[in-house]
Image: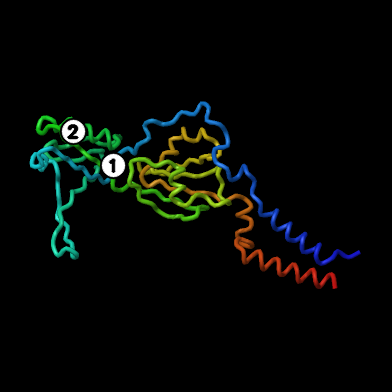
């Protein structure tokens, strides 16, 4: 007995649906418990050579802070004049900057809070009750691959984790591999990489979990996504295949 048209279409539809399903283990983050996980308390961004810094010194008496605040004039067509902005400090290859009055300061390896305290202590012989704000201007990361909104993002804070970066990119698609996320990092002029398993909470202990300047995050597609990328990677592909199979079934059953 020939199969009915309805049965054939139903079978084809179920085959397509189940072939595209993704298991829970492939899409759920942090599937284990939180026991014995050590969070990194020293996670803030570390200053490196070639970083661009702004350093603002504020004091109760504004005039006292002037020698420590290098400024530059920036022409603005909107205001038909020049605006005054803080000068940026480029960290030299030896990890130092030239700071007004103080001269050469070693900054490499410090986070912004540590550098703020170092400068505040050093200028305390000249001004009292100073407030020093340090910011890294070139902190940016790129998120690529199976995420909703891939791109390069400028980070305003001094800290961003891998999961926060994925959130900025709209999170992974259901086709992204949670257990094999690659982070590419430049250290001393050479590229290094690590693969992180975001289904395991112990990943937060990895030195690559807290991102650094110019890190690149790549989310690899799962196997079924790679296999189907050239054939049925969107709704129109499913419709075209389904239409072809229905036409074939009609010809066979008639």
> Where, quadrant-wise, is the C terminus in this rendering?
bottom right
Q: In this view, does 188 lie to the left or right of 123?
A: right
| Residue at image location 35% in from the left, 47% down from the top | 155
Query: What percent of the width, then of the height, locates residue 213?
Result: 36, 44
Relative height, residue 200 to residue 11 (above, below) = above
- Quadrant of the rendered image containing residue 28: top right
Q: Is mark 2 on a helix, strand or loop?
A: helix
Q: Is residue 13 left or right of residue 5?
A: left
Q: How far apart are marks 1 and 2 (CA)?
A: 22 Å
Q: In this view, does 39 lie to the left or right of 246?
A: left
> Where, quadrant-wise, is the N terminus in this rendering?
bottom right
Judged from this view, the residue extending furthest toward the right is: 1
Q: Mark 1 points at which residue?
A: 49
| Residue at image location 64% in from the left, 46% down from the top | 23
Number of disc labels: 2
Q: Name the residue under label 2.
A: 120
Point out the tag, 1 or 2, that comes first from the N-terminus.
Answer: 1
Query: What percent of the width, then of the height, locates residue 50?
Result: 28, 45
- Quadrant of the rendered image containing residue 10: bottom right
Relative height, residue 168 to residue 242 (above, below) = above
User: How busy is the neighbourhood of tag 1: few (under 14 within 10 Å), some, or many (20 plus)?
Assistant: some
- Quadrant of the rendered image containing residue 159: top left
Q: Is mark 1 on a helix, strand or loop?
A: loop
| Residue at image location 39% in from the left, 42% down from the top | 160
Judged from this view, the residue extending furthest toward the front is: 60
Query: What percent of the width, then of the height, locates residue 219?
Result: 51, 49
Which label belongs to residue 17?
Answer: none
Relative height, residue 28 to residue 205 (above, below) = below
User: How busy is the neighbourhood of tag 2: few (under 14 within 10 Å), some, or many (20 plus)?
Assistant: some
Judged from this view, the residue extending furthest toward the top is: 36
- Along the line of sight, which residue is nearer the eye, 68 or 192? 68
């Amino acid at each position: 007995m020939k199969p009915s048209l309805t049965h054939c279409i139903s079978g084809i539809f179920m085959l397509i649906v189940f072939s595209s399903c993704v298991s829970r283990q492939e899409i759920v983050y942090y599937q284990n418990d939180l026991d014995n996980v050590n969070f990194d308390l020293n996670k803030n961004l570390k200053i490196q050579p070639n970083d661009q810094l702004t350093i603002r010194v504020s004091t109760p008496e504004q005039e006292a802070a002037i020698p420590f605040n290098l400024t530059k004039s920036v022409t603005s067509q909107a205001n038909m004049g020049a605006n005054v902005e803080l000068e940026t400090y480029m960290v030299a290859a030896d990890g130092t900057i030239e700071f007004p009055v103080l001269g050469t300061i070693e900054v490499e390896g410090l986070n912004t809070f540590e550098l703020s305290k170092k400068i505040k202590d050093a200028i305390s012989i000249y001004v009292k009750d100073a407030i020093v704000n340090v910011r890294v201007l070139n902190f940016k990361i790129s998120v690529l691959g199976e995420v909703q909104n891939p791109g390069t993002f400028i980070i305003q804070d001094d800290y961003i984790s891998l999961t926060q970066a994925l959130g900025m990119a709209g999170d992974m698609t259901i086709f992204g591999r949670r257990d094999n996320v690659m982070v590419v990092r430049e250290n001393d002029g050479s590229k290094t990489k690590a693969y992180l398993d975001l289904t395991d909470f112990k990943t937060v202990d990895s030195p690559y979990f807290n991102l650094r300047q110019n890190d690149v995050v790549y989310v690899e597609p799962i196997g079924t996504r790679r296999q189907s990328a050239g054939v049925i990677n969107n709704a129109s592909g499913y419709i075209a295949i389904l239409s072809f199979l229905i036409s074939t079934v009609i010809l066979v059953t008639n």
